[in-house]
Image (cartoon, rainbow, N blue to C red):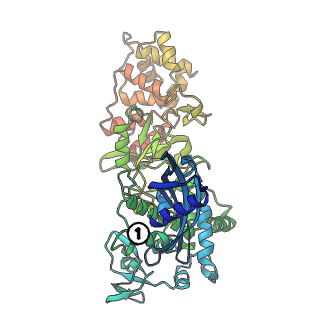
Amino acid sequence: MSVISQGLNDYIKANSSDDDRYKINDIIIHTLAWNSFDFGLLTVTIGVSAKLTTTIDSTSSIHYYNMTVQGQILKGLFDLSLINIEEVPESLLQKETILSLFGMENITSDNIEKKAEELYSQLCSDIHINKEHKYWLPVIDIKEKYGMKLWPADLPDNCFGQLYLLPSAATIYDPANIYKPYPDKPIPRGAILLNRRYYINEIDPDDIITTAHELLHWSCHQLYFLIMMLLEDGFDAMSCTTDPIILDDKMTSKEKAYFYAEWQANELSIRVAMPKHLVEKAIVDYEKDHGNILHDGFYYQNMIYKLSWDFNVSKEIMKKRFRQLGYDYADGTFLTVDDCLYQPFSFASGTLKENETFVINRASYKKLLRDDKKFAELIRSKKFVYTGYVVCIYNGKFIKPVREKGEIRYTLSEYGRNNVNKCCLILERNPETPVNRKNVFYVNEYFCRLNDPDEYVEEDEDGEYILSEDANEDKKTFFYERYEVINDMKAKQINTLHDALIYHKERKKLTYDQLSYRCNMSRETIDAYFAKPSSTKFRKCPIEKLMVICNGLELEEIPALDLLKKAGYALNEDVIEGQMYRYLLTITNASLEAWNKILSDAGLKPLS
């Protein structure tokens, strides 16, 4: 304040005439922002106001100034000097943010890739890249270049690594003899400790990312460290942990600054370990060797697996990097959801944005059911079904049933896995999901909300329901389903089973003999089931036989369900038979043999 006060006095004196003198009072600091930090010399701009009172008539007015100050900060802020002062309107006072206050660059989604490329070049300059491991981030060479030390150490289970900002002591291990501890060894400033469990394979091998995380702290946050040391006694290390880091308006400025420092190190570490230009080159190299292979989910999964070895990172990290770079097909790879492994899927390129996904775990699915009424209606009405990892249209073209432990669950069919964009709901990661290191290092951001609640479904050229490509242009209904047949039957007052059977046979342009052949029933049996109840030929049609007739008629799902209802059969979907019969009615264009195989695979009796 003394530097500011003296500077203002000198500035006003130099810009005032002998007849116009002022007395300065009520100096207030409004904003503070760092400009540069070179060799310990910190330059900041301070936005201040001052009350100026004339010595002639004692009138007062408030004036505003941007003042640039320099000082040494390596051992505490001292030797301050004013190097510039400018009077400005209040609206032009130097702006202050948490980042500018604590000496950090403003890194955003718009510039983060460019910044990562710059940091990669800076860190790897003057370092010889090993041709055998040409894509590896040379962390050992980088730490030696900066004169840093790196050791395995006993760290808490939730701690991946630590960066020491001041000399200290710790129990460390020699990487060549990981089971021999060296207790209370001196640790110099700039030492990196990695959790020893990396070296004995007790945790996933993300040591490259953890080391990069600490190296980026060292490269980007030196001024932040010094400022924090001035403000907080005992601030001597940065710890990379799995503890949640949640940005909250109730945080203090120091807490917010810590959040941003960790966010920057998290986001940059993945990008610097796998810079954009190298990932693109590795993809091209892979395509040259495998370009003639079908580009399905397995292809992309194998590519990501191969590149994870090329970059010496985990496959989960590689998958996340692909998504960051806009390769949305990575969403269908390495699908371990709720500890269950699923086959990879694929879809049309350009389907997903970075914050979108097809994948949702059970806890998030249940929460979505509770929170979103439209989503709950989709599931309740059997328009969509949850498979344990994606939410798919309830249609046998896209899903198939699997019986496990006496229950039926559904999984994607081969066609569904190769066309997920046609049958599965796109979900959006909730922006309020806590940002934490575990979610940055692993792809477990499953809490999702329904994306575009006005999206609907239409029919493809085969008469199957698919998600419409033009869904966003039509907001009339959430899900399109054809009811023309039902409406036509109502208009023609077709209310009985007999009339409905005749109606569908004629609509499908089938003779009784053709239907008899399709259903593998005698003509006499068909005639009996089609007869009026008052006829002597009439025989009540069991549900199993009526299912076969639905198959022979190739009835659409809604008319088929209507036919069963007219016969007095309501499918009980609380039991396996009811679930399977309902599923079969979505694929009435399949052969009767295919139907019976599906039933047999589920441990049920065939229909005929």
Residue at position x 41%, y 85% in the image: 188
Q: Position of residue 182 (x, y in %)?
A: 33, 90
Q: Amino acid at mark 1?
A: Met
Residue 608 shows in the view = no
The answer to whether 540 appears left or right of 319 in the picture is left
The one of 438 and 506 positioned closer to us in this rendering:
438
Badge 1 is on which residue?
228
Residue 114 location, quadrant: bottom right
Residue at position x 30%, y 50% in the image: 405
- 548 over 404 or under it: above or below: above
Q: How many marks?
A: 1
The one of 182 and 586 positioned closer to us in this rendering:
182
Q: Position of residue 358 (x, y in %)?
A: 49, 47
The answer to whether 249 appears left or right of 39 in the picture is left
- 338 over 498 or under it: above or below: below
Quarter of the picture holding the C terminus: top left
10 Å neighbourhood of mark 1: few (<14), some, or many (≥20)?
A: some
Residue 24 shows in the view = yes
